[in-house]
Amino acid sequence: MQQPPTERRIRTPRRGALLASATALALAVTLTASTGRPSDRSPTAAGPGSVPRTTALGPCMISGKSGVQMSEGIPTRTGYARSTGIVHALTLMIDFSDAPGRGSAMDRFHEFFPQTAEWFRVGSYGRLDYRAKTPIRQWLRMPKPFKKYGIERGAPFEPGYRGLVDDIIKTTDGKIDFRDYDLVNVIVTPNAGPSALDTVLSVTFAGNEDAPVADGVPLANASFVYSRQDDGSGSYARTGYRVLPHENGHVFGLPDLYTQDGGGAGHWDIMSEDWGAGNDLLGWHKWKLGWLDNRQVSCVSRPGTSDHVLTPLESRGGTKLAFVPLDGRTGIAVEIRTRGGNDEDVCRPGALIYRVDAGIDTGHGPVTVYDSTHDSGGCTRSPNVHAELSDATFTPGQTFTDPKTGTRISIHSRTPDGNYHLHITRP
């Protein structure tokens, strides 16, 4: 199987410029490789590919051609880790003779937990019970120095990472049964490799059918985290953990939303920017992961004008997403983003409108947020985020019109209970 090109996010040396986030490599999927404890799984626990197709929502379940890397299509293809129910995440802290772990391994573990599990709990409305398991609570020393592995930014499973994973399997032999876990987190001592301010090494292998095998199962969904993200804002200790939810987003089948030029989604999704103040996932991704029910999605597939009341994405219940399919591959989504939940830094609450293209590979801009205030400079004061899009939301009285199709979304009003009333016209 031919492997796709590596997608990279490279930090700019200029202070104040947009800082890029963690690298992620998505490999093609044809094999389901999720493992776990059957007794811990609810019979109704959904996986990323479990969004049921219905007649009403069928036109909105867009899809890309086979071969698209980590397509935004719904349902998600098989091979990724389950994204609802109880998910066991094997978490190992590793070090090397030329990069010994500083402090205790559990101190390193607590840089990411319980924050990561809480982020998933809040974002999924309690539908993802993420359980980080640490059967080895000390630094796991690798048999070779870090430099000997020849690991480079975004390298595939050959040869550096394959050698590293093989050594992890050998070093843990008899101590871990990999069949007990749904995904693997390898938390590397941060003094291995360069600082995240210079080069981001963190990478995820998701849905990889050619992964090394341990205890009879391929380690098909594995995240490797090196230095945490630091945007220079002083929030490092509080928000640096979010590089791991970003990487784990890939093991659940989500693509990178950034591009080489920055990001088509700005700070509106952790798969775009995962540093600085907190942010959530787009409503489209929540539906894709099974965190939204089909009844919480309004599919605008018929011509004419329709009325919609959307509740803020942060809250439970209500209709969260309206989607206008343009063809079998693309569509326009609208959702309400306010300051709350994982969205702690929303500086302009309102209706976020964006285009989803299931035919675009991860890292090439599968999502484009429409900016209601072009060239404003944005409203956020957080440094090094895509500030221009921070005030992209549309507020009551504003209307978005798609120049290509004439699709019109009018923000009519905000109700006293915080919901938004919209008119959507499909030619």
Image (spheres, rainbow, N blue to C red):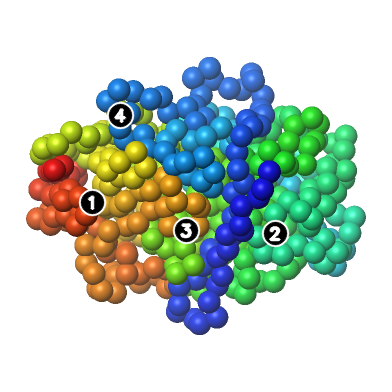
- Looking at the rendered image, the disc whose residue lies closer to the viewer, 1 or 4, is 4
Figure check: 10 above or below 251: below
Query: In the rendered structure, which amino acid carries the disc numbered 1?
Result: Ala
Of residues 334 and 315, the one nearer the viewer is 334
Residue 231, given in percent of the width and then of the height, sits at: 51, 70
Instruction: State the SS at label 1.
Output: strand
Q: Residues within 10 Å of mark 2 (few under 14, many from 20)?
A: many
Q: Marks 4 and 3: in contact by CB < 8 Å?
A: no
Residue named by callout 1: 351
Compared with 390, 30 (above or below) is above
**Which residue position holds label 3?**
364
Cα separation, mark 1 vs mark 3, equals: 24 Å
Of mark 4 and mark 2, the one earlier in the sequence is 4
Q: Which residue is mark 2?
A: 155
Answer yes or no: is residue 165 visible. Answer: yes
Quadrant in which the C terminus is drawn = top left
Q: Which one is closest to the eye, mark 1 or mark 3?
A: 3
Marked residue nearer the N-terminal end (2 or 3): 2
Going from N to C along the chain, the mark reached first, 3 or 4, is 4
Residue 104's x, y, as percent? 76, 56
Asked which secondary structure carries label 2, the reply is loop
Q: Earlier in the sequence, mark 1 or mark 4?
A: 4
**Could you tell which of marks 1 and 3 lies nearer the N-terminus?**
1
